[in-house]
Image (spheres, grey):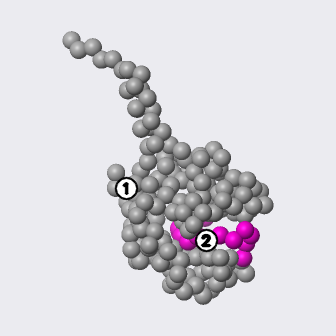
Amino acid sequence: MYKFTITVATLLLLFSASVNAQVRVLMSTSEGDIEIDLYTNNAPITAGNFLSLIDKRHLDGGAFYRVVSYENDKGAPLIEVIQGGLGDRSNEFDSIEHETTEQTGILHTDGVISMARGAVGTASTEFFIILGNQPSLDFGGERNADNQGFAAFGKVVTGMDVVRNIQSLPADGPSDSEYTLDQILTQPVMINTVRRTN
């Protein structure tokens, strides 16, 4: 009969693997592919919600529809992001609890993916990808008056060239708000599929 023992070193290795757990997904768009690592341990609520949308194929047929740059941003401090999701269909989905960057440790640096929201706790299907470093979107940042920041939950590992290309596309689409004037893509970039790859 074999005796199974677990050493302290083994436990530390298992703990380390658990802490760094991530799920890689491939987002196929009409402008090219974007690979993203979702940090399921650091941001279990937000990453879990995104994976649920992926696994149920809800994001298939979505789009990137808004691009924000230092030239067209109406907020302060200025930021650079591309925003996508389901648009008007987002109200069909439940919102999720807000996970701050203070809780998760995932800061809004180049390539990070985060959830769009209005008030705290209203995020559901809309997300954005960061270009450059945007600390005003972190907990305590000044982009929102509530200073709660946005819920970051993963990072682009390949395809930032696609992200930058999307941001450079013409954006003179109709807007129902002065805030998003000159930020709505003339032709939305379709999200064909999003699938797990590991």
The amino acid type of the residue labelled 2 equals: Glu
| Picture coordinates of residue 158, whole percent (x, y) | 40, 64
Residue underneath mark 1: 196
Q: Is residue 83 above or below residue 99?
A: below
* Residue appearing at x 73%, y 53% in the figure: 140
* Residue appearing at x 72%, y 76% in the figure: 74
| Picture coordinates of residue 21, whole percent (x, y) | 44, 43
Q: In which quarter of the image is residue 68?
A: bottom right
- Residue 35 lies in magenta, yes or no? no
Residue underneath mark 2: 80
Total marks in image: 2
In the image, which residues are magenta?
Answer: 74-92
- Mark 1 Cα shell of 10 Å, populated few (<14), some (14-19), many (≥20): some
Q: Is residue 189 above or below residue 10?
A: below
| CA gap, disc 2 and disc 1 | 27 Å
Q: Quadrant of the N terminus?
A: top left
* Residue appearing at x 74%, y 70% in the figure: 76
Nearer the camera: disc 2 or disc 1: 2
- In the image, 117 versus 14, the foreground residue is 14
The amino acid type of the residue labelled 1 equals: Arg
Is tag 2's residue or tag 1's residue first in the polypeptide sequence? Answer: 2
Per the image, label 2 sits on a secondary structure element best described as loop
Q: Is residue 151 above or below residue 1?
A: below
Q: Is residue 124 visible?
A: no
